[in-house]
């Protein structure tokens, strides 16, 4: 059985005088224990909102509505009350954020921020927590952890800060880690180090990881299963190998084609996807990607397409998928 | 122009040494230490700080070294001062600022008055700060983190603060004085209560702004309780403007206290010298000895100036927009 089973998750934001925004519109996916699952898509496709909804961190206001279920090892995360959700957060499910500088409290030393989790969830005393924090910082590859504990976030480099955030997230050895674009704010060499660290932690601690990113390169390097999101719905889901070998959805195809390549000829232009995402009710009348799609046919308009299952578990939401045979030319 | 290779290397090494030295220097730099560093570079801050240090020194140590007692009406006893006939001698070698209208040594009274002024200023600011931080902190935390019920609580608290804002300090002081009788405590309560709304609003606003920051989200993603987040994450990040305001409020508090005791709402017993009261007492003799009014007035102005200079400099030093 899956560790996390998200069924038909939907998040809508309603504001008076404005049309309701369907940020997440029926997303379903599974995460097995110890598995690395990627949620991929461009800005505004609902990746971050999905993660915040799972963590119960969306603002509790009128107008914000979360639907569907997220079965985490027998409990539905979405229907838990605030108090129980607070106990789950940090202990069973933890999150790593995009911008490590703004995610750390600027006026509190790193050490206090790390020990805070330990005191909260593992009932540790101050001294025990400090000792554990030193080990944690060491574990995530921060040199001289004893000194770093006393330092403030602005004294650490970007990579260090992200490592410190990761240390806080894994402090209680959660069974599920959600990383929301953990490498976007870092430069490329540091990105590789952080991804390596995450891979290592997932392997050693047996933690499942939901990797949220727009970077297919990141996904290719570490995810077991990949879900491609578009306008609040999963449009394609497959094991990594299968996806890269034979993507079927034109959007996935477009994402892959728009990655800059080192082996491309000089002066060769990138292949972008035309247009941009529609944000209000994109799936109401047909495929939300249809207006931007090169493979659009008449069936794309009218009914929103359903997920097409295949025997390998590779699913896609498209009536006119990229044919498997064309993958050699398309990948070139 | 070409550098000899050896020279270039040395320059590079020097540069490296310099960089690492800066790095060492920065170790353990907190927000406050950084602010201190910027304060020391600001001439206005230095002037303000020097004024305040002198003022505090005079207020604390001065009364032990004054040449005469503050209640000793020696001028009248010795027949030098006849205020009824308009004879109040000015500065002399024995009495540096002359006598007051009751024949007491003006200099001694001025110095002892500094202590009274300092105490009253600090206490009334503390009254305002404590109540203001409590109300504002509660409202800010409730509005920022508490969801719908929190916003309701915030609404109630802030309406109370609005009501306090509509109270004129003079009216409040008069009514408190009517209840408790005119005394220095009356004045401190009045001045303190009037500054509550400013502190409350300032703290609430800055806490609400902080509540939307990423580190608050990150802390709640780790299951940290709301009250803990408010106290150990949001509050320390929101205090800077309140502290600046407290420094500036000290200046206005001193002026207001002087104004209220000038109007006779303070301690009516002129045995305890207070600058505002001294001003009031000097009123009938303005034509004969304007100095009696000028000395305490200058004291009030210089002290308020010191607090204001330091407060403004602190505002600059703590402004996150100017921080590098």
Image (cartoon, coloured by chain):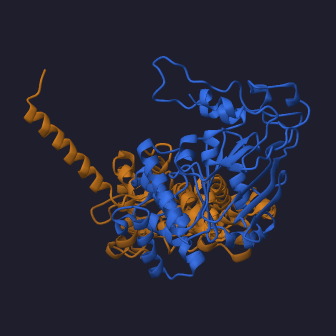
Q: Is residue B2 left or right of residue A170?
A: left
**Image quadrant of residue B255?**
bottom right
Position of the N terminus of chain A, as image quadrant, is: bottom right
Extreme residue in the right direction: A302
Q: Position of residue A19 (x, y in %)?
A: 87, 38
Q: Position of residue B215 (x, y in %)?
A: 58, 57
Q: Position of residue A282 (x, y in %)?
A: 82, 36
Position of the C terminus of chain A, as image quadrant, is: top right
Query: Looking at the picture, does residue A45 appear above or below residue A119?
Result: above
Chain B, hue in figure: orange
Is residue B109 among the parts visible in the rendering? yes
Q: Is residue A190 left or right of residue B231?
A: left
Q: Residue at x 50, y 30 (%)?
A: A261
Query: Looking at the picture, does residue B212 appear above or below residue A170?
Result: above
Give whichever of B298, A229 is nearer the camera: A229
Q: Is residue B176 left or right of residue A185?
A: right
Give whichever of A247, B32 is nearer the camera: A247
Total marks placed? 0
Q: Position of residue A252 (x, y in %)?
A: 67, 36
Q: Residue at x 48, y 48 (%)?
A: B312
Q: Residue at x 41, y 44 (%)?
A: A189
Extreme residue in the top direction: A267
Q: Is residue B192 left or right of residue A140?
A: right
Query: Looking at the picture, does residue A81 appear above or below residue A277?
Result: below
Chain that is coloured blue in the picture: A
Is residue B170 among the parts visible in the rendering? no
**Image quadrant of residue B252?**
bottom right
Give whichever of B207, B49 is nearer the camera: B207
């Amino acid at each position: 059985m899956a560790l996390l089973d998200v069924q038909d998750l939907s998040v809508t934001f309603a504001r008076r005088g404005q049309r309701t925004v369907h940020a997440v519109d029926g997303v379903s996916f599974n995460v097995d224990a110890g598995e690395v699952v990627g949620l991929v898509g461009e800005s505004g496709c609902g990746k971050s909102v999905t993660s915040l909804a799972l963590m119960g961190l969306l603002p509790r206001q009128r107008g914000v509505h979360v639907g569907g279920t997220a079965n985490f090892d027998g409990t539905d995360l979405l229907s838990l009350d605030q108090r129980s959700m607070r106990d789950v957060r940090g202990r069973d499910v933890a999150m790593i954020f995009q911008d490590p500088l703004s995610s750390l409290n600027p006026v509190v030393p790193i050490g206090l921020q790390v020990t805070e989790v330990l005191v909260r969830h593992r009932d540790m005393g101050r001294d025990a927590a400090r000792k554990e924090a030193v080990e944690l910082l060491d574990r995530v590859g921060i040199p001289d952890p004893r000194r770093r504990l006393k330092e403030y976030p602005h004294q650490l480099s970007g990579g260090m800060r992200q490592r410190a955030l990761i240390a806080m997230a894994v402090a209680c050895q959660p069974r599920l880690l959600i990383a929301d674009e953990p490498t976007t704010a870092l430069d490329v060499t540091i990105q590789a180090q952080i991804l390596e660290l995450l891979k290592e932690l997932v392997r050693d601690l047996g933690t499942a990881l939901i990797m949220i990113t727009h970077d297919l390169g990141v996904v290719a390097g570490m995810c077991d299963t990949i879900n491609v999101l578009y306008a609040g719905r999963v449009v394609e889901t497959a094991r990594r190998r299968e996806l890269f070998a034979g993507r079927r959805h034109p959007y996935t195809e477009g994402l892959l084609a728009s990655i800059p390549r080192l082996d491309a000829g000089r002066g060769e232009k990138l292949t972008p996807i035309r247009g941009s995402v529609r944000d209000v009710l994109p799936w109401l009348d047909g495929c939300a990607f249809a207006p931007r799609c090169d493979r659009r046919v008449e069936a794309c308009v009218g009914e929103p397409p359903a997920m097409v299952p295949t025997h390998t578990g590779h699913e896609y939401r498209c009536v006119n998928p990229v044919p498997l045979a064309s993958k050699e030319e398309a990948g070139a | 122009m070409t550098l000899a290779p050896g020279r270039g290397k040395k320059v590079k090494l020097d540069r490296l040494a310099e960089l690492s030295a800066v790095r060492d220097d920065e170790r353990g730099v907190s927000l406050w230490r950084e602010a201190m560093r910027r304060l020391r570079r600001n001439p206005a801050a230095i002037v303000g700080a020097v004024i305040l240090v002198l003022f505090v020194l005079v207020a604390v140590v001065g009364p032990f070294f004054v040449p005469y007692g503050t209640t000793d009406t020696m001028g009248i006893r010795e027949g030098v001062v006849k205020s009824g006939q308009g004879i109040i001698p000015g500065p002399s070698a024995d009495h540096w600022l002359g006598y007051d209208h009751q024949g007491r040594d003006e200099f001694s009274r001025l110095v002892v008055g500094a202590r009274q002024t300092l105490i009253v200023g600090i206490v009334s600011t503390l009254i305002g700060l404590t109540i203001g931080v409590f109300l504002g902190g509660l409202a800010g935390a409730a509005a920022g983190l508490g969801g719908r019920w929190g916003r309701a609580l915030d609404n109630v608290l802030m309406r109370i603060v609005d009501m306090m804002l509509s109270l004129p300090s003079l009216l409040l002081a008069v009514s408190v004085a009517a209840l408790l009788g005119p005394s220095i405590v009356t004045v401190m309560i009045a001045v303190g209560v009037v500054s509550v709304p400013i502190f409350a609003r300032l703290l609430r606003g800055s806490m609400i702004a902080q509540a939307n920051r990423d580190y608050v989200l990150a802390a709640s993603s780790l299951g940290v309780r709301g009250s803990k987040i408010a106290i150990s994450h949001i509050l320390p990040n929101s205090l800077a403007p309140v502290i600046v305001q407290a420094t500036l409020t000290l200046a206005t508090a001193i002026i207001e206290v002087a104004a209220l005791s000038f109007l006779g709402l303070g301690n009516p017993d002129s045995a305890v010298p207070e600058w505002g009261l001294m001003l009031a007492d000097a009123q009938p003799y303005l034509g004969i000895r304007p100095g009696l009014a000028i000395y305490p007035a200058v004291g009030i102005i210089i002290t308020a100036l010191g607090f204001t200079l330091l407060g403004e400099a602190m505002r600059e030093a703590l402004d996150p927009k100017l921080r590098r």
